[in-house]
Image (cartoon, rainbow, N blue to C red):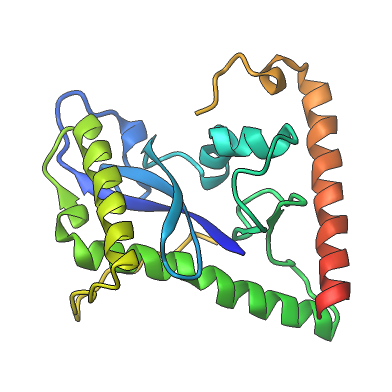
Amino acid sequence: AASANSSPSAYYQSSSLSHASQSTKHGHFAKFLKVICDADLIFINCVSKWPGSVHDARILRESPLFQAFENNARKPVDGLLLGDSGYMQRDWLFTPLSNPTTRAEGNYNASHMSARSSVERSIGVLKRRWHCLRRLRLAPHKACKVIVVCIMLHNRARRWKLDVPSDSDSDSSSSDDGSDSDSEAEQQRPAQRQMTERARVAAGKVARQRFINNNF
């Protein structure tokens, strides 16, 4: 399983062009980073362009990765994605159960939390390796490029098994628990989109329950 998360990847220097939508709920100017990583803390997908006020689910929903999964194309990522409860349930994206009622469901939630912790740790390691990500004194578009390059270098370091710099003041991220606008989904009428969304969520819940029944 691969873990998905969105996190304030880096705070950046505000400028006269900065807008309120770029700031987080704490008033910092930030860019949100959507990442997917594996159990080895290697990033296998990232999107670094969204302002800090945008919700996690929207970042995923408007990504090419989401469209590839939704349109039943060849899976861009092997296995299942794991996301927190802020994401939409799908048959390819599993979220935790809000109210587990059986031991199997409780075990599923515990396993889900344990597996998904890799994405939190990967962001912590990324920031320990590249301290500049804590606060970039750059314009937003340049900050996004720096973030992506740091992720590429992080992946190379993980594959080469380089040591992670020790940092007692490490900054691990936690969750708050672009596709083209003319895509087929965007052309659907609002009522039809709602029906499609409900059907996909329902199919995702069925797939999740089947997975729980077969594995826990």
Q: Which residue is nearer to you in this view: 29 or 161?
A: 161
Answer above or below: position of 128 versus 57: below
Q: Which residue is nearer to you in this view: 28 or 196?
A: 196
* Percent of width and height locating residue 140: 23, 33
Measuring 57% from the left and 44% from the top, which residue is drawn there?
57
Measuring 42% from the left and 67% from the top, which residue is drawn there?
41
Q: Which residue is nearer to you in this view: 163 or 159?
A: 159
Measuring 17% from the left and 36% from the top, which residue is drawn there?
14
Q: Which residue is nearer to you in this view: 16 or 210?
A: 210
Name which quarter of the figure residue 49 lies in. Answer: top left
Res 104 seen here: yes
Say which quadrant the N terminus sits in.
bottom right
Q: Is residue 98 left or right of residue 149?
A: right
Which residue ends up furthest to the front in the rendered image?
160
* Percent of width and height locating residue 193: 78, 26
Say which quadrant the C terminus sits in.
bottom right
Which residue ends up furthest to the bottom in the rendered image?
103
Measuring 60% from the left and 50% from the top, which residue is drawn there?
77
* Percent of width and height locating residue 28: 26, 47
* Percent of width and height locating residue 176: 49, 59
Labels in figure, total: 0
Res 28 seen here: no
